[in-house]
Amino acid sequence: MTTVSGALRAAPPEGGQHRQPIVAAAIELTASEGWSAVTMARLAVAAGVSRQTVYNEIGSKAALAEVMISHELARFLAVVRTAFERHPRDLVEAIYEAIRAVLDLADDNTLLRAIASATHGTDTELLPLLTTRAGSLLTEAKTMLAERVRAYEPPLDDDQVAVVIDLVVRTVLSHVMQPSDTPARTADALAWVVGRVLGTSASRPMRQR
């Protein structure tokens, strides 16, 4: 019997020209009908390729979940990188823009809606795969952020930076899955907290309130 972790490794490391259409079709199908409705045959029809091509590009259904999640993570990390690049001298503003961009992107993300449904018990097949990947996703995101933040030479040691990043990442993920305010107001509040930790809150009041 194939384990979840073994199935995840079945995905080819580099996809060919058909991988992106297949992944896009899988995301749309998952969002509209649920993960249980996703089959290699249906993906082949939706992407306009043969079923063998789907297997060649993806490997298995569990590997497909891995590819889908990695695809979406790459989109979120891209907007975070852009935010830091736009504010190379102002860490708090970079964090504000990064959080707002992530929450804006999450606001209409079809895969995240499907994941939210899974976490509420409507598609239990997807949830174990997400749980398996969650730790490495968090590590990947926090590692990238730590590298970015260190470039600003904040008045914190590495352990303190790690605590702040962990707090921000977990809070943002909470708001991604269950928003309690607008992206702008949430980002503003979290940036204010970071500013207080860094001792720079006076330069950035909570402007959205």
Image (spheres, rainbow, N blue to C red):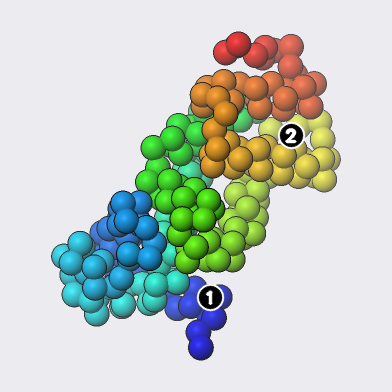
Classify mark 2: residues with Cα within 10 Å, few (<14), some (14-19) or many (20+): few
**How far from the left and from the top, in percent, is residue 117?**
46, 50
**How far from the left and from the top, in percent, is residue 150?**
70, 40
Q: Where the C terminus falls, by quadrant?
A: top right
**How far from the left and from the top, in percent, is residue 11?**
42, 74
Q: Nearer the viewer, mark 2 or mark 1?
A: 1
Q: In this rendering, would 47 be left or right of 79?
A: left
**How far from the left and from the top, in percent, is residue 160?**
82, 40
Regarding residue 100, the answer to whether it shows in the image is yes
Q: How many marks?
A: 2
Q: Is mark 1 on a helix, strand or loop?
A: helix
**Label 2 is placed on what type of residue?**
Glu
User: 62 or 121, which lies in front?
Assistant: 121
Residue 163 lies, with reference to residue 4, above or below; the image says: above
Residue 21 lies, with reference to residue 173, above or below; the image says: below
**Label 1 is placed on what type of residue?**
Val
Which image quarter: residue 161?
Answer: top right
Residue drawn where x is 52% and y is 66% of the image: 129
- In the picture of the structure, the residue carrying the numbered disc 1 is 4
Q: What element carries label 2?
A: loop
Residue drawn where x is 66% and y is 27% of the image: 190
User: What whole-number distance in Å separates the C-alpha atoms at marks 2 and 1?
Assistant: 41 Å
Classify mark 1: residues with Cα within 10 Å, few (<14), some (14-19) or many (20+): some
Q: In this rendering, would 15 be left or right of 89?
A: left
Residue 73 lies, with reference to residue 198, above or below; the image says: below
Disc ID at residue 153: 2
Disc ID at residue 21: none
Which image quarter: residue 17?
Answer: bottom left
